[in-house]
Amino acid sequence: MFVLYKVSQGADELGQVARYLIHYSWSSDYGVSIMFFSILIFLMIVFGFGYSLMYITKIDCEDSFVYWIVICGLGLAVFGVLSTFMSMFYIPLHYSIFVALSLIIPLWSYLSENFPKKPVFGMHEKLVVVLFVLVFGMMLQGSFAYPYLEDDDPWGHAEAAKYISVTHIASEPAGVDYHYIDPYPPAYDILMGVLHQTNNSISWTLKFFNSLLVGLTILFFYALMVGFIKDKNIALFSTFILAMTQSFMSHFICSQTYLIPIIIIDFY
């Protein structure tokens, strides 16, 4: 009964999220073109870097669906490492640079007619996508249930991400202390700062993409279970249990939301 309640609750919240996005997509504060441009940049960066790493290392997966999930996860990991090194050497942290770097190998592969096959969606894959949408929807609805940021950490991340988006660097100026830049690993704030360069709301950037990272964790966990157990039925059931667990991640804006999915995909 508890599981059925969670599923029905998730479906109801997903409907609220859809209505929210439709309403704010056409508002003067966000705008549908700006919102989807930010999402497009995120997808180009993570899939570009992920595919580049898979191409260079010759990593392959028998399951085409898992293959694309792993590409996305590795892309997040590559971005974290690359952006940190770029920050150390004062290379501008601008979204155009990341997009250009991420697309070099994919474009070369496409022109060489060596692009990977499309993912195949069977019953297991469709159900996993449904779980992803439900978790992402619940997190998104919770994040936008109120207009402000909660507690303390999100405000600190907002300050650091805003600074990075404007200055294109992740090094603190003299006399200024951003808690989540130095000596804190800056990858999470760099990601949010780079994405914020493509829209006009730091609050929307943090809430939306933090919720998206939580949702992607469901997909990454499924890929890990498929690779570890080699049984899609058990992998799907394990992922379902994780998604229905109340102690599994929240929409609270914190850098661990970036760390946990990367650790899961690294185990794969």
Image: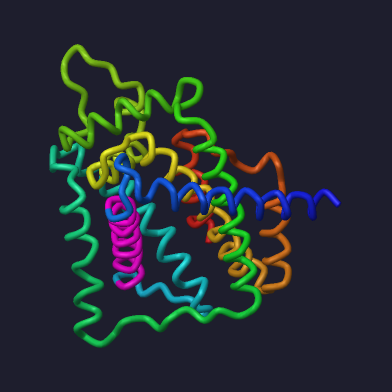
On screen, residue 29 above or below 158: below
Measured along the vertical axis of the image, is residue 47 above or below residue 143? below
Q: Which residues are magenta?
A: 34-55
Q: Observer-nearest residue: 205 or 177?
A: 205
Question: Residue at left 69%, top 73%?
Answer: 231
Left or right of 46: which side holds 253?
A: right
Viewer-nearest residue: 62 or 40: 40
Residue placed most toward the observer, 130 or 236: 130
The picture places residue 123, in percent across and down from the top left corner, at: 65, 77
Which residue sits at x=20%, y=38%? 87
Vertical position of residue 210 compared to residue 78: above or below: above
Q: Dominant secondary structure of the magenta stretch?
A: helix
Q: Judge whether residue 7 is colored magenta.
A: no
Q: x, y (%) of residue 230? A: 65, 73
Identify the image quadrant of residue 11: bottom right
Q: Residue at x 30, y 42 (%)?
A: 28
Is residue 146 left or right of 126 when viewed as pictured? left
